[in-house]
Amino acid sequence: TSSESPVVSVQQTANAVQNMVKYGFPSTDNLRSYEDFMLSYDRRTRVPNWVLEHLTPEKVTAKEGVERSKMQFVEDVSVHVYHRATNKDYLKSGYDRGHMAAAANHRQSQNAMAQTFTLSNIAPQVGEGFNRDVWNNLEKYVRALARKNKNVYVCTGPLFLPQYEPNGKLYVKYEVIGQNHVAVPTHFFKVVVVENNTGQLELQSYVMPNQVLPPDIKVHHYLAPLDMIERAAGLNFFQNIPKETFHKVNSPPKIKS
Amino acid sequence: TSSESPVVSVQQTANAVQNMVKYGFPSTDNLRSYEDFMLSYDRRTRVPNWVLEHLTPEKVTAKEGVERSKMQFVEDVSVHVYHRATNKDYLKSGYDRGHMAAAANHRQSQNAMAQTFTLSNIAPQVGEGFNRDVWNNLEKYVRALARKNKNVYVCTGPLFLPQYEPNGKLYVKYEVIGQNHVAVPTHFFKVVVVENNTGQLELQSYVMPNQVLPPDIKVHHYLAPLDMIERAAGLNFFQNIPKETFHKVNSPPKIKS
Ligand SMILES: [Mg+2]
Ligand SMILES: [Mg+2]
């Protein structure tokens, strides 16, 4: 569990954070740094604004003794009780506790993986057909990228997208669950920067609706323009990288997904 | 207009900010400090998270040459264009550009008042029956408090409150206006700390729905528990004041409203 003493030094954590934010902070509100990912927590919606990871071939390789089956979801006691999501909020809500930083991205230590089960890294996701299926496929695809490249930077988070109603006006509408009114995002984004073994940078950005999705659909069906995500999320991603630096932007995949 | 050179020194501004945050920051995201108020801007909703003011008898006293009629609403060019509200967003939306820090609270200088017309201090409000009526009455009442007391601290902002739908579930729903999807809050809060001339502290906290309200209703009809506002807004107000310090909390008014 996450109450185990960390197995990394302060210097290692500082290095990890430095790697994660190498290309900039999406925002600076309510930051939390963990052993192998960091996030900004939205106290109003009780889900993260964004979660940032730096992946390498080593980090996504299974290590003996680091097993997901041993993990438990834990509340983030660093968040004021007024603004904290609890396990009870999710209970019988019909939604999964969906990881933003995926557990299987952090296989270097029991502690690193356990920290991904902190509820500040979690948002309500449709289970079957989404979290356990198409969204999971996207996470697996990102890990495949991490295995075959030098560095992969991933920023993941919720979106609350508006829709037109019959009166011709646009409305944002989302369910809130539990006593603490945890917001159920309408969509999720994942923005991925890949640095390949020759140092070239590639950008891929995805938006998926938080719904049951067709089981055989390719994840690349959900590629979406970066600026659309930045506008809707109220964030700027990897802003230290001039856009013209990218070798490829949202181009078809080479790795089978 | 706000492009006039400021009439206050850096030291005066620093003092003003120090007074405003004497009792704590509601949050620390996207802070902006002006001559006589400060705010946290929500880049996702394009309205402030909160706006904080420190009022004194002097500040709310009319000064020759400082006139609202000379003012124009201006965009906040310090906000990225992806996340910035514009005058065009409000045009023909049916909503007023509603001040969070009220213009008439800042009568010490043309510059101080002009800055309240920055769109980062603005949110869409129902005009007749709300912004121009009952909400305006609340602002007048707060100025009456400021005239009769040593110090008044005011924190104002939007709320997006959930409602039950026929399926028994809770949903947050709000309109967004213009090309930049400026969010129309369902409610607004105003949290007021009054320090009277003997140094006693009083707290008053209000929530009003962003709707046409009954014209003769007393503003104190809208007193609401502080913790309800803190939970819904994702904020903590004046947290440097221990709750037991307050002489009065949401008790009936002495000044006629
Ligand atoms: Mg998952
Ligand atoms: Mg007004």
Image (cartoon, coloured by chain):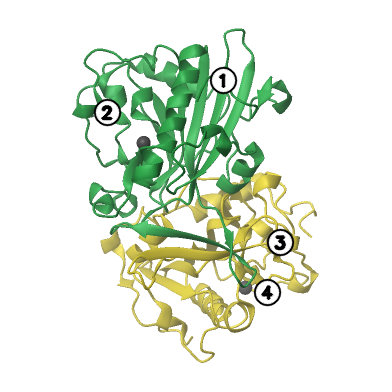
Chain colours: A yellow, B green
Q: Does the Cβ of the disc 4 residue fall within 8 Å of ligand 1?
A: no
Q: Which residue is denoted by mark 2 in the rendering? A: B114
Could you give the CA–CA distance between mark 3 and mark 1, rounded to whole angstroms? 37 Å
Report ligand 2 position as a quadrant.
Answer: top left
Residue located at (36% from left, 14% from top): B61
Q: Which residue is denoted by mark 3 in the rendering? A: A89
The chain identifier of the residue carrying mark 3 reads A
Q: As shown in the figure, which amino acid type bears the numbered disc 1?
A: Val
Q: Identify the secondary structure beneath mark 1.
A: strand
Could you give the CA–CA distance between mark 4 and mark 2, rounded to whole angstroms? 50 Å
* Position of B204 relative to B152 (above/below): below
Q: Identify the secondary structure beneath mark 2.
A: helix
- Mark 1, Cα crowd under 10 Å, few <14 / some 14-19 / many 20+, is many
Relative to residue A35, is residue A67 drawn left or right?
right
Q: As shown in the figure, which amino acid type bears the numbered disc 4?
A: Gly
Of the residues tagged 2 and 1, which is closer to the observer?
Answer: 1
Q: As shown in the figure, which amino acid type bears the numbered disc 3?
A: Asp
Q: Identify the secondary structure beneath mark 3.
A: helix
